[in-house]
């Protein structure tokens, strides 16, 4: 999976209770197609065994400076990115002063690859001015500091000091591995998930959108260097690390958020499945079941967000990718929506095709360009399709 496929990650694990989370992280990296070398400090081996990592990565784990001559140079040289997780106060302090007393610190001192440091320690150790000064030094060296998070810590304490979750570290690694892109420095707005329109104070009309496609596009845009705002209806919870998230429920709320965000945007990716219908008159009280036989509800169309923002987008030159969910005459209908709603690219889905549309991990898209050209993208996971769609946005923006 891009950008992990065939890339080499060096994972440095130092001695903290959170070391077990690094085993999950190494598994996620392997699943994504990376190869992972692991260095365990002496203290780390008290928390997790070399065999655990060897079983997951299929590679020998490195623990000693003199295990193989020059290991500290070779490991750093061959890595595309180095991740220190968990990074203890002791290892951070050694890195800050250029220590080289063990394999972990010597390798970090000799390495040229980007370094991501994920601190984990007791909250008082984290807040100590010595640790804060060391973190400032690491930032000056150009290292990326991810976390620590706030929450329950070892020994029943709580505060800032927890290792961030493996998914967040994965996102940061993905960003470090991504090559330079046209998205760098652009403001990207992504809408995702369904919206709801109320039928009465307790019921609503909505649709089966899970938000997967939109969240994948938002994450991939961030990895490429975009500053990303995700405006989301009630969707399946997944990682939003690095994204600025605005949660909405109704089409009106999404419209307001969208108008505000578009003022500064360069790209709009409109994946939201906006609820198209609203009840003409919302009752103040819950509709009772008794006596409701033959109940009819009068509906009218709600706002069309792309239509409503068309002139603003045209005025500000915002590149727009939209979606079209169809059951018949898919390409023709998609093309018509593109022209009417002012999009530069439209990704057409056929709702009743197996493996495509709502509530599934995969999708099949026909991509219609404003020139009229149609490209069939093969069935793929929504994560993979997100990167393919961004590649198409990048080249269409250059045209
Ligand atoms: N869209 C929108 N506002 C709506 C409905 C849809 O901005 N009220 C956007 C969607 O996010 C998508 C595009 O318009 O990018 C096409 O959405 P789709 O549901 O396929 O089409 P509709 O315009 O709703 O038309 P229909 O349901 O009649 O096919």
Image (cartoon, rainbow, N blue to C red):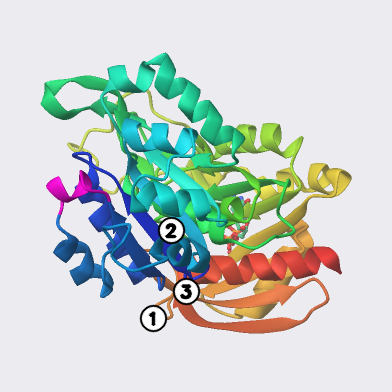
Secondary structure type for disc 1: loop
Q: Could you tell me if residue 208 is visible in this image?
A: no
Residue displayed at 43% across by 54% down: 107
- The disc, 3 or 2, on the residue closer to the chain's N-terminal end is 3
Residue 193: percent from the left, percent from the top?
Answer: 46, 50
Q: Residue 392 sits in which quadrant?
A: bottom right
**Height in image: 229 above or below 382?**
above
Q: Would you say the magenta stretch is mainly helix, strand or loop?
A: loop
Residue placed under numbered mark 2 in the picture: 212
Horizontally, residue 91 falls left or right of residue 233, namely left
Q: Residue 129 sits in which quadrant?
A: top left
- The disc, 2 or 1, on the residue closer to the chain's N-terminal end is 2
Taking the magenta stretch, the answer to whether it contains residue 319 is: no
Residue placed under numbered mark 3 in the picture: 5
- The disc, 3 or 1, on the residue closer to the chain's N-terminal end is 3
Residue bounds of the magenta highlight: 41-48
Residue 113: percent from the left, percent from the top?
Answer: 55, 57
Distance between the alpha carbons at the discs numbered 3 and 1: 27 Å
Residue placed under numbered mark 1 in the picture: 354
Distance between the alpha carbons at the discs numbered 3 and 2: 21 Å
Residue 389: percent from the left, percent from the top?
Answer: 62, 68
Residue displayed at 33% across by 68% down: 68
**Height in image: 59 above or below 344?**
below
Residue displayed at 24% across by 57% down: 23
Front residue of 127 and 44:
44
Q: Assess disc 2: are there few (<14), some (14-19) or many (≥20) residues with their C-alpha within 10 Å of its C-alpha.
A: many
Residue 196: percent from the left, percent from the top?
Answer: 43, 42
Horizontally, residue 191 falls left or right of residue 247, namely right
Q: Could you tell me if residue 231 is visible in this image?
A: yes
Residue displayed at 20% across by 28% down: 153
Q: How many marks?
A: 3
**Height in image: 167 above or below 16?**
below
């Amino acid at each position: 999976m891009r950008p992990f496929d065939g890339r080499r990650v060096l994972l440095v694990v130092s001695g903290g209770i959170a070391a077990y989370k690094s085993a999950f992280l190494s598994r996620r990296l392997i699943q994504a197609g990376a190869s992972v070398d692991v260095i365990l400090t002496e203290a780390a081996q008290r928390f997790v065994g070399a065999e655990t990592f060897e079983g997951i990565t299929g590679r020998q784990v490195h623990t000693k400076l003199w295990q193989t001559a020059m290991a500290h140079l070779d490991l750093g040289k061959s890595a595309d990115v180095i991740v220190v997780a968990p990074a203890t106060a002791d290892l951070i302090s050694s890195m800050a002063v250029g220590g080289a007393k063990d394999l972990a610190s010597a390798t970090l001192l000799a390495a040229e690859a980007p370094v991501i440091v994920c601190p984990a320690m007791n909250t008082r150790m984290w807040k100590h001015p010595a640790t804060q000064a060391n973190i400032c030094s690491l930032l000056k060296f150009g290292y990326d500091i991810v976390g620590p998070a706030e929450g329950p810590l070892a020994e029943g304490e709580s505060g800032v000091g927890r290792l961030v979750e493996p998914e967040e570290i994965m996102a940061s690694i993905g960003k470090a591995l991504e090559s330079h892109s046209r998205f760098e420095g652009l403001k990207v707005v992504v809408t995702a998930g369904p919206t709801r329109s109320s039928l009465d104070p307790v019921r609503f009309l909505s649709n089966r959108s899970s938000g997967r496609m939109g969240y994948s596009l938002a994450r991939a845009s961030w990895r490429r260097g975009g500053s990303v705002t995700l405006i989301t209806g009630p969707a399946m919870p997944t990682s939003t690390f690095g994204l600025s998230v605005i949660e909405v429920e109704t089409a009106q709320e999404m419209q307001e958020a969208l108008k505000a965000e578009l003022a500064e945007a360069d790209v709009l990716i409109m994946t939201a499945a906006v609820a198209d219908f609203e009840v003409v008159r919302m009752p103040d009280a819950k509709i009772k079941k008794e006596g409701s036989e033959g109940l009819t509800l009068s509906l009218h169309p709600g706002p069309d967000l792309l239509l409503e923002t068309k002139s603003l987008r045209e005025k500000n030159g915002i590149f727009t990718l939209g979606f079209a969910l169809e059951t018949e005459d898919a390409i023709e209908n998609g093309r018509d929506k593109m022209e009417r709603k002012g999009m530069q690219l439209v990704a057409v889905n056929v709702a009743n095709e197996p493996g495509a549309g709502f509530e599934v991990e995969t999708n099949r898209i026909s991509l219609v360009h404003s020139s009229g050209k149609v490209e069939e993208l093969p069935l793929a996971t929504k994560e993979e399709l997100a990167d393919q769609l961004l590649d198409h946005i990048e080249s269409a923006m250059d045209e």
